[in-house]
Image (cartoon, rainbow, N blue to C red):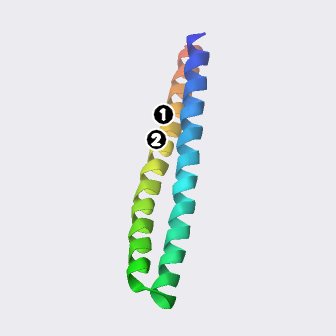
Amino acid sequence: MRRRVREAREAASLASHVLVAVGFGIATGLCLTGGFSSVVLSPRWLGGVLLAMGLGFAVLFVREALLARALVRTRRLRRRDRQLRAEV
């Protein structure tokens, strides 16, 4: 019972990290595109602000992606450990 609850919690945590990373990735793309367009076509200060926001979102995207990757790795190691213990 506890294992099932833990697995469900891990799956939900992984899904939330992936969704947040996707959101940050979309925000990064939108801010960088808007920033480059604004730098060329309209007030440069607005473009600078959007570019800075895009860089901030990029950092957050990388952080969340690394956390999701670590969760997947931990989950795989735990499953492998469980398989090895079952064989013995």
Which residue is nearer to you in this view: 84 or 76? 76
Q: Which residue is mark 2?
A: 70
State the count of labels.
2
Q: Is residue 21 above or below residue 54?
A: above
Gap between marks 1 and 2 measured at Cα: 6 Å
Give SS at disc 1.
Answer: helix
Which residue is nearer to you in this view: 49 or 86? 49
Residue at the outermost front position: 43
Q: Which residue is mark 1?
A: 74
- Type of amino acid at the residue the image marks with label 2: Ala
Q: Looking at the figure, which quarter contains the N terminus?
A: top right
Residue at the outermost bottom position: 41
Q: Residue at x 39, y 77 (%)?
A: 48
Which residue is nearer to you in this view: 25 or 68? 25
Q: Residue at x 54, y 60 (%)?
A: 25
Quarter of the rendering containing residue 82: top right
Quarter of the rendering containing residue 39: bottom left
- Type of amino acid at the residue the image marks with label 1: Thr
User: Could you tell me residue 15's position as x and y percent?
Assistant: 59, 39
Q: Looking at the figure, which quarter contains the C terminus?
A: top right
Q: Is residue 76 left or right of residue 45?
A: right
User: Could you tell me residue 59's position as x and y percent?
Assistant: 40, 59
